[in-house]
Image (spheres, grey):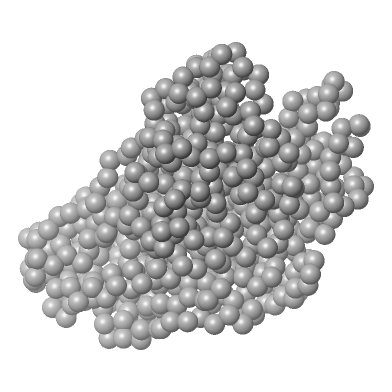
Amino acid sequence: MKAVHDVSAPYPIKSVALLSDSNEAHGGMTDVDVVLVDKDSHARTATGYHITWAKFPMSSRDPVFIAGAGPSGLVLALALAKNGVPVRIIDKDSTYHVGQRGAGLQPRTLEMYHFLGVLDDVKRSGFAPMKRCIYEMPEGRKPVKIFDIIEWVEPTPSVPYSNSFAIAQARNEEILRSHLERYNVSVEMNCELVDFDQDDLGVTAHIIKRGGDHESPDTVRASFLVGADGARSIVRKKLGLAFFGETREEDRMLNAELELKGLSGDVVLALVGRSCDHVYLRKTEVEGVFSCMIYGRQVDFQPLLDDHSLLFQRIKEISNRHELEFGKVLWISEWRPNVRMTDRFSEDRVFIVGDAGHVHSPMGAQGLNSGVQDSYNLAWKLNLVYKGLSGTSLLNSYTTERLPVIADMLGRTTAIMDESAKFKSTDPSANPHMRPLILNQLGVNCRWSPIVVDDQPEAKEASRAGAYLLADPTVLFAGDRAPDAPGLVDVRKKDEPNTTALFDIFEPTKHVVLIFAKIVEEARPILLVLSEFPALATTKVIILPQLDNESSLTVEADFVLVDKEGHARASYPPVTKGFPLIVVRPDGVVGAVVKNAPGMKRYFDGILLLAD
């Protein structure tokens, strides 16, 4: 086929696969050198050569190997699978995880779940956060305060998911696994990573597969290895990464899910005993099942773990609710505060995400969310490097961008834990349960990153503002979360409905280039530069204030949108300041804020090998 000769590749092409849809390019596409996507069906009808394409370097046919199938590992696997990158994911446990565990999803994570296509399923399986009720003790009957644990915020056009959401971690993982299976990737249970070696071209992982009383060693050759294997991470230990921080032996927390009668479940009960032991009880998505957390200092929980009748007695004593009726304990574990993190998250072709790189208090519901965001940051970079579109130096930005965020987060969650431990419900003026709005993570950023480009005069000063900020809709800098904008009219779509939102265009597979223009002709120099890049690397979006002439229908852009309600310009303040070109990365972060095509090219020169 002649079109193959139009594909530039820095290595010999021996075999080509022609697909009708980029979604076909999943883990099975490991035995070809080039994958061509016949987007417009020209190749199949032999009438032209407009083919979008992706290439897999011959040294990178091996899958990305992920150890650990919690939310961090599953999100990484799903994002890579959506990009057509072959993935293997294992977990050392014999059964899937159970229990609530990290049940709180922050707004920023909800946005990422939207981009991954799993949010609708999540929304159907969980519920909005409930108010917290603190009772006057020791009677435990009279409410002292009823309040939202974090300020309730009305959604806006730029922030459609403005409040947190609760879903059992077990159900969260189940949903992620079901979406991953659509790409023919399943979690390999009872498989434990025990060692690995890496070289210039890949990683050799040594695993043990278990079944009944039988164990069999095996090796896996991978392009990259990612440890999502928790606080006791074998990947972190084998890399020799120090786990800086502290373990607080005097503090203990017991978490359980249990059957319970006698509570309405309308609010989260916060009950504090005379010795400052805390009991929190909240309903779950299962009728009659409650999540229970008991927190105290210098408390021995082992008897409660061994004898559940003692657990029930302890809850009654602290809460003074002797009428409560308990059933089965469905899940129970003890936790002690570990506040630790590494000083880097990778070494060459091996990476760590989530608890493998940082552990902290569950107060503030930042842990699971931070791990998911680690993975989402890493996924698009691995994708581009795996396909040979970016150099391996791009992967260095993973640690550079995430390390300051995690350090800030550890400080905040530890402070919340310390305040909660001191709380006595006899002091109604105190309220350590209230969480600052900054914990919604919408202001988490990486403005300091060496791979972002921002030509705004204030950008340098903004890069020193910190990793955790309160989101400010009046400013936007490279490294910030990219806002949404609904009500955009797609001028090429004649059928109703013909409106879309930016969040429905953002995806983990491509950079989205937003070109704000008065008329289509203003966008052509930018589109000309973008035509030099691989088509599967970018989505080109022209945003107009009003309908242009017929050139809107013929211009080489993926979308021509009319900002009929003005939400796009309002959500992207740099546009009104003379910076009409915004590049949004595949992780939903603003990569560039620039004035023109040369500025855009400067950004992509730091990302793509083919941007010359």
Rendered residue at 75%/69% (across/down): 203
Quarter-wise, where is residue 90 in the image?
bottom right
Rendered residue at 57%/70% (across/down): 345
Residue 114 or residue 293, whichever sits in front:
114
What percent of the width, then of the height, locates residue 576? 41, 35
Total numbered badges shown on the rendered structure: 0
Relative vertical location of residue 379 with respect to residue 346 in this rendering, above or below = above
Relative vertical location of residue 25 with respect to residue 435 in this rendering, above or below = above
508 on left or right of 23: left
222 on left or right of 260: right
534 on left or right of 543: right
Residue 90 or residue 442, whichever sits in front:
442
What percent of the width, then of the height, locates residue 144? 9, 61
392 on left or right of 420: right
Relative vertical location of residue 306 with respect to residue 61 in this rendering, above or below = below
Rendered residue at 75%/35% (across/down): 52
What percent of the width, then of the height, locates residue 51? 78, 32
Residue 117 or residue 466, whichever sits in front:
466
What percent of the width, then of the height, locates residue 489? 48, 22
Residue 332 seen by the camera: no
Residue 381 seen by the camera: yes
